[in-house]
């Protein structure tokens, strides 16, 4: 690699690190928003975030949630028990194995999930302080990234169908 290419690569690396550092700082500076949004809905932040990971029109097996969240299945059981007690989810027998329970959002759970996502998607004031030109450049740059939707769970049923 020629010196100019190494210099350009080093410059790109520094810019990428600076951009990532700012994105991280922005995300971390907004942690209290999660709790505020959830509290306004009468929920804990973990309740609301758990709802985000349950597909609106598809049941999801608790084992799939445990894999998606990279956690112990007993923690998922506790989360789902709480959401079920709040009337936001229900457990139904699995389509192919009645011993397996799938978690489905109730109508109230779907409405709560949608309202929570809407509130989370409102930009923080820090971003609204940027100029239209800067916001446009930021949106264009981030829009070029092929980002997966972290709320989409590859369920065993969907994987078998693909």
Image (spheres, rainbow, N blue to C red):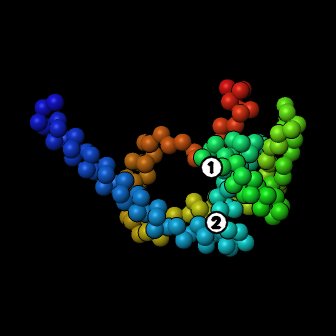
The quadrant of the picture occupied by the C terminus is top right
Which residue is the extreme one toward the left? 3
Q: Is residue 6 above or below residue 54?
A: above
Corner quadrant of residue 110: bottom right
The residue labelled by disc 2 is 45
Corner quadrant of residue 98: top right
Q: Is residue 80 above or below residue 127?
A: above
Tell which tag, 2 or 1, sits nearer the viewer: 1
- Sequence-wise, which precedes: disc 2 or disc 1? 2
Horizontal and vertical percent position of residue 2: 12, 32
Determine the residue positioned at 35% across, 57% down.
Answer: 21
The residue labelled by disc 1 is 71
The one nearer the camera, 71 or 95, is: 71
Distance, label 2 to label 1, CA atoms, is: 17 Å
Instruction: Count residues near mark 1 (Cα–Cα under 10 Å), then give few for <14, some for 14-19, many for 20+.
Output: few
Left or right of 122 on screen, residue 18: left
Determine the residue positioned at 71% across, 26% down.
Answer: 160
Instruction: Count residues near mark 2 (Cα–Cα under 10 Å), then give few for <14, some for 14-19, many for 20+.
Output: some
On residue 122, which mark appears? none
**Local secondary structure at mark 2:** helix
The quadrant of the picture occupied by the N terminus is top left
Determine the residue positioned at 54% across, 42% down.
Answer: 148
Is residue 115 in sight in this rendering? no
């Amino acid at each position: 690699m020629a010196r100019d290419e190494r210099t350009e690569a080093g410059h790109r690396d520094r810019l990428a690190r600076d951009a990532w550092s700012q994105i991280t700082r922005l995300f971390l500076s907004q942690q209290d928003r999660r709790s505020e949004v959830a509290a306004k809905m009468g929920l804990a932040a973990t309740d609301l975030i758990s709802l985000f990971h349950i597909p609106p029109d598809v049941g999801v097996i608790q084992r799939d949630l445990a894999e998606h969240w990279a956690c112990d299945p007993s923690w998922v059981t506790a989360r789902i028990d709480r959401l079920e007690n709040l009337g936001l989810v229900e457990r139904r027998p699995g389509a192919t194995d009645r011993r397996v329970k799938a978690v489905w959002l109730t109508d109230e759970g779907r409405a709560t999930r949608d309202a929570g996502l809407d509130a989370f998607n409102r930009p923080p004031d820090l971003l609204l302080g940027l100029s239209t030109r800067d916001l446009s450049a930021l949106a264009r740059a981030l829009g070029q990234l092929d980002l997966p939707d972290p709320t989409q769970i590859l369920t065993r049923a969907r994987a078998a169908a693909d």
